[in-house]
Image (cartoon, rainbow, N blue to C red):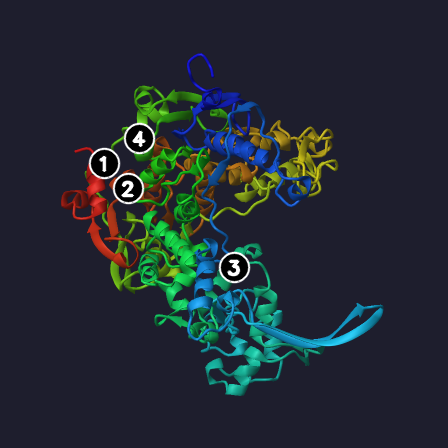
Amino acid sequence: MSKSGLHVADSHDLIRVHGARVNNLKDVSVEIPKRRLTVFTGVSGSGKSSLVFGTIAAESQRMINETYSAFVQGFMPTLSRPDVDVLDGLTTAIIVDQERMGSDPRSTVGTATDANAMLRILFSRLGKPHIGSPQAFSFNVASVSGAGAVKFERGGKTVKERREFSVLGGMCPNCEGRGQVSDFDLAELYDDTKSINEGPFKVPGYSADGWYGRIFGGSGFFDPDKPIREFTEKELNDLLYKEPTKIKVEGINLTYEGLIPKLQKSMLAKDRESMQPHVRAFVDRAITFTDCPECGGTRLSETARSSKIAGINIADACAMQISDLAEWTRGLDDASVGPLLENLQQTLDSFVEIGLGYLSLDRPSGTLSGGEAQRTKMIRHLGSSLTDVTYVFDEPTIGLHPHDIQRMNDLLLRLRDKGNTVLVVEHKPQTIAIADHVVDLGPGAGTAGGTVCFEGDVEGLRSSDTTTGRHLEDRTKLKAQVREPSGELEIRGANAHNLQDVDVDVPLGVLCVITGVAGSGKSSLVRGSIPRDAGVIEVDQTAIRGSRRSNPATYTGMLDPIRKAFAKANGVKPALFSANSEGACPGCNGAGVIYTDLAMMAGVATTCEECEGKRFQAAVLEYEFGGKDISEVLAMSVAQAEEFFGDGDGRIPAAHKILQRLTDVGLGYLRLGQPLTTLSGGERQRLKLATHMSEKGGVYVLDEPTTGLHLADVEQLLALLDRLVDAGKSVIVIEHHQAVMAHADWIIDLGPGAGHDGGRVVFEGTPADLVKDRSTLTGEHLAEYVEE
């Protein structure tokens, strides 16, 4: 015992971080109280994730991995030690991040949360008629059977025996457990009023005088001057589906094949992401997915659907709203499966409690929003008996209506009150307000951030003169005048997911905000009902695909004009100025670092000695443009590069235009050569927005653009949206942030609740009318937020 009467073991009540230098952190030192709720704030890109995820959580996970044997470590992901001097007092970290769940078509909410596994066991025990093991109810297990001779040694002799086996799976044989079958929309392949010689095909590269047009025209299987709609059944079949057949066209021997198998081999076999944009757009138009006619989209075979409990089969159970399924499960009472029912009940109740009771277990996990995915991951921790654990959350309020944030706050406090340390990266004032301790990073983003601006309680933050402190009490005024729409998009009878035959007119030429509680049907309305041919540019929150070799310069296409300018100025090939091509340093293949794999130990990345991390051959760095070599250009920030390429010797108008857009979306601090893997979620979405701003569409659909944005950055985003509208574009935003709602010209509010309690338009009109009415949850919260 120590002098104060406190046991020595109870004195370790701080997590101490000294000298953290991960990413942009500048020797950061903080002391975080254990068993308290600590919120990390700061502008986007200030280093919050680097400190919480890249340093504290990463080291905790690495140390846990080291407790396993070397054999087990060989199968685990290897983690390197973060760049930090001292990390003391760590506890086991459980990370609940916003990574979208895999968009594998076979993954559903049920398979991702173990609820399906429990239901399958339940049906295999209680289902009538009894059809087999839990596998018989799984849409990922196919039914197979076989027989044959097996040879094996017994007592020095080779013995032959006949063996048979069979596996009964629940997979629908027609759609292979995907629930949907793909088909070609023939109207998108050709115009049936034209003949082959008139060039009817709408497929990229299939013109009448092109090679494909001449093959179809000279095949002899149909009259090339007859309109396609007048073809006989056999002629149409030859055009679309004919097996590969040897023919002679214009004196050349070749193989003729029907249009559809040809497209399946040439276009559909490729990964969608690797297609050229115009080909991808064609494939998106031409391929339609329809529910499988055999299983009705349930993914399950007829046998699996025939077994029922209390008149309900497993497909019905998975299609129910989870809150209803929880009630149904409560009505089952069978001692033989008591523990299983109890466990299933707990999981389903957790869904309801966390505000996801409106989902169904058969919902594909790839369709969940970032916020929904994060809350789904929280479910397994809610009922956990573990204490003294560090829970790390990445903006848990994303995708939540102000009404739902209160619920999330209660959950965070419950986790803390069980004796856990809760670390939250957050921007919303409602959640910052419940913190026991606040760490504010900044003052700016990127190289201008990475230092601790404030550490203390919320009251101290309010009175501190930091960016967060100044903006914490921000309130917005309602617009005195709203813009008049220039037209409207008519949506009639929308019924995707939970929408209940919604009729609504979305105004064009203005800033229109679509809002409502989580699960009320906002995304369903925008994604499922706005016609794709309306020149729509969608900027959603899906992750940017890119390796550590990708950077803002390659992603936005800015590197092409820069490489050409360097090549022209020096009279050499553009490929020399690419670190992924001929200009790459031979020592590190243009990566700048050399990775040494140490099996189950963490791999070591050392800066390449040959190029000193510059990624290019020494000879390439001798070529200059405007007094800078290519590695110096890639090391510039967007703001510096905008100045450099704007005028003088370094003028490149094409690059300057892209840089201006990056500055417009508030990414002036990013380095051109910064790997995409180091960008935060908010930065990635703004990078996407910048790339899409050059496209020709007239309607922008943004999915929660305030994600990952600090209160101070929201003002800049609103100015950008205003500029888009003033330039004649229509902007439709799905959003919960009150500042964006107050700034809108028109609001469409969906609700009143989530799931089957939502899906209706509860208000449409101006923000001022919504505040005056206070008739909806959104109206109440907006009225509280705006200045009178």
The tag earlier along the polypeptide, 3 or 1, is: 3
Residue 159 image-quadrant placement: bottom right
The residue to which callout 1 is attached is 785
The tag earlier along the polypeptide, 2 or 1, is: 2
Q: CA distance from mark 3 to mark 1?
A: 43 Å
The residue to which callout 4 is attached is 433
**Callout 1 secondary element:** helix
Q: CA distance from mark 2 to mark 4?
A: 14 Å
Above or below, comparing residue 132 to residue 409 in the picture = below
Q: CA distance from mark 3 to mark 2?
A: 38 Å
**Callout 4 secondary element:** loop
**Callout 2 secondary element:** helix
Nearer-the-camera pick, 732 or 202: 732
Nearer-the-camera pick, 398 or 412: 412
Check disc 1 and give the amino acid type.
Tyr
The x and y percentages for residue 712 are 35, 30
Check disc 3 and give the amino acid type.
Arg
The tag earlier along the polypeptide, 2 or 4, is: 2
The residue to which callout 3 is attached is 280
Residue at point 63%, 31% (across, down): 631
Q: CA distance from mark 2 to mark 1?
A: 10 Å
Give the residue furthest to the top.
Answer: 3
Tell me if I can see residue 718 in this picture: yes
Tell me whether circle 2 and circle 1 mark residues in contact (CB < 8 Å).
Answer: yes
